[in-house]
Image (spheres, rainbow, N blue to C red):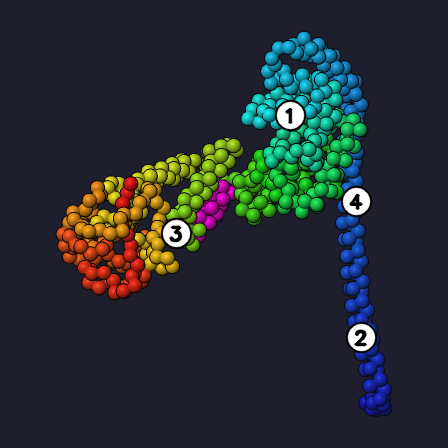
Amino acid sequence: MAPEAVSAIPASLVQQSFAELDKQRELITCCTQLWKELSDHFSTLERGLEMKSEALRSKRQSLDASSRRTLSVLRRREFTIDASVEVALSKLGAVQAIQVVSSAAEGDELDLTSKLRSFCTKVDFHGFFDLVVAKRKEVELLRSELPVALADCIDPGKFVIDAISGVFPVDKRPVKSPNDLGWACVLVLESLVPNLADPELGPARPLVTRTIRERAQDMAKEWKENLELRGGIENVKPPDAHTFLQHVVTFGIVEKDDKELYRRLVVTFAWRRQMPKLAISLGLEDKIEDIIEELINNGHQLDAISFAHEAGLQEKFPPVQLLKSFLEDSKIATSTEEDSNNSGQTANTTSRREQSVIRAAIKCIQEHKLEAEFPMESLQKRLEHLEKAKVEKKKTSSVSPTTDRPNSPANKRTRANNGGPMPPAKAGRLTNNAYVSSFPAPHTFVRSPLVHTTCPGTSPYPYDSPPGHGVYGSRSPSAIRDAYGYPTEVTPAPLAASYTSPPMSYPPYGNYNNGLGGYHNVLAPVYQPVYYR
């Protein structure tokens, strides 16, 4: 009965059933894939929300910490108001007392410190700045005395701005001196920092009035505007850029929008000694690592060592490795230059450059106290060797090339038969056939008579030619002789004791006949021998 029932089911119904099953299977597969995609999507959203929540949480924590620090600073500033007022009042009393003493001692001759303090108490900023410029040779003394003198000013910030306003941000002097006064501005601005420091917070909060701060900001803005007119950072003088950065730090007018400008100036003039400290004071702590890497890539490893030492990044940028890299790069550059040009001048330049490199490395080791990690004995020995070689070369070059020929005139080609100087190789090429020496003549010459009746066998001049000289022999060095196309010297037979003919003739571009005769040229111009007077 069952087989009959199975055979009674039509084949089309079976096919429809299988098609329906395939549809259901495809639907289940599609739903499963869609579920996986939705699950992955929601998992991604969840992870993103968690990351954003964590970022917001950390940002909130940093903001809370910043708010607490700001409130703490504000409370400290509030507490320091009374102390600042007391400091100002005591300073005012001290200034008054100094003015009395200065007035009493006006007739006496004052030393540098007294002069500086006198200008500060009298608010004579022009005389103050002129005195600083005049004492450039006493920079170290100025560096120690200027902070003391500026402390006598009633308003040190205004006094310094008035003092440097004649040359910064633009040189307004009626007669511009070729000397750059940026060094004086930097020195005065550095000396002002301790006088503007808050009694409690220190230099982090300079005590500058709103008027002075606005004036300082206007000066900085004017300098930035003139920067583009001068052609950008590449055309700025190092003292000028240093003055700008020190001005910004001294008056506490750092702008967040100018951080890139500060970074470019710091990298461009990183070789200046104060740049690492200025970079920290300008708020570039987060960019110090990038600055150091840029300096290393540009081949300024010694500057990178200074920045790493100032920022406390010696572990990330080991100074010993940077020193070795600096010396290796310098050695490769020196070897390349020597291979490309082997002239004596290039050798001297290479030696001086190597000495400068070694001295810079020794100075870096001493400044950062790296003697234990990088001994200097090898560098010092190499430096001594180069200096001795330089001294020996000077001694060798100082010996005269004619010391072994005391009776021969320098740079003269002498004739063997009568001791007179030979004409230069180009004498026969002149249109008028006149004798023109191509060598510098230290003596005065006078032409001999035009006609000679006899010529004695021995030379009448005090400088007889040496033995072995031929008729046309030359005393000129081989280098000079070759340069002018003279052939190799040959020693022919000597001349007779006397002759009645006129002096020998020298035509242009002639050839020798046999060493005894003249040249094959009937139009040969007559060369008249000369003698010293």
> Is residue 325 inside the magenta stretch?
yes
Residue mark closest to the camera, 2 vs 4: 4
Does residue 3 appear left or right of residue 382 in this picture?
right
Q: CA distance from mark 2 to mark 3?
A: 84 Å
Q: CA distance from mark 1 to mark 3?
A: 50 Å
Of mark 4 and mark 1, the one earlier in the sequence is 4
Of mark 1 and mark 3, the one earlier in the sequence is 1
Q: Secondary structure at mark 1?
A: helix
Q: Which residue is mark 1?
A: 130
Q: Which residues are magenta?
A: 322-336
Does residue 151 appear left or right of residue 468 in this picture?
right
Residue kind at label 4, given as amino acid type: Leu
Residue mark closest to the camera, 1 vs 2: 1
The residue shown at (30%, 40%) is 399
Q: Residue 25, relative to residue 48: is it above or below?
A: below
Q: Secondary structure at mark 4?
A: helix
Residue kind at label 3, given as amino acid type: Asn
Q: Secondary structure at mark 3?
A: loop
Residue mark closest to the camera, 4 vs 3: 3
Does residue 58 appear left or right of residue 113 in this picture?
right
Categorize mark 2 by other alpha carbons within 10 Å: few (<14), some (14-19), many (20+).
few
Q: Which residue is mark 3?
A: 342
**Is there CB contact under 8 Å for labels 4 and 1?**
no
Q: CA distance from mark 4 to mark 3?
A: 66 Å
The residue shown at (31%, 44%) is 445
Q: CA distance from mark 4 to mark 1?
A: 57 Å
Of mark 4 and mark 3, the one earlier in the sequence is 4
Categorize mark 1 by other alpha carbons within 10 Å: few (<14), some (14-19), many (20+).
few
User: 104 and 401: which one is in front?
Assistant: 401
SS assignment for the magenta stretch, majority: helix
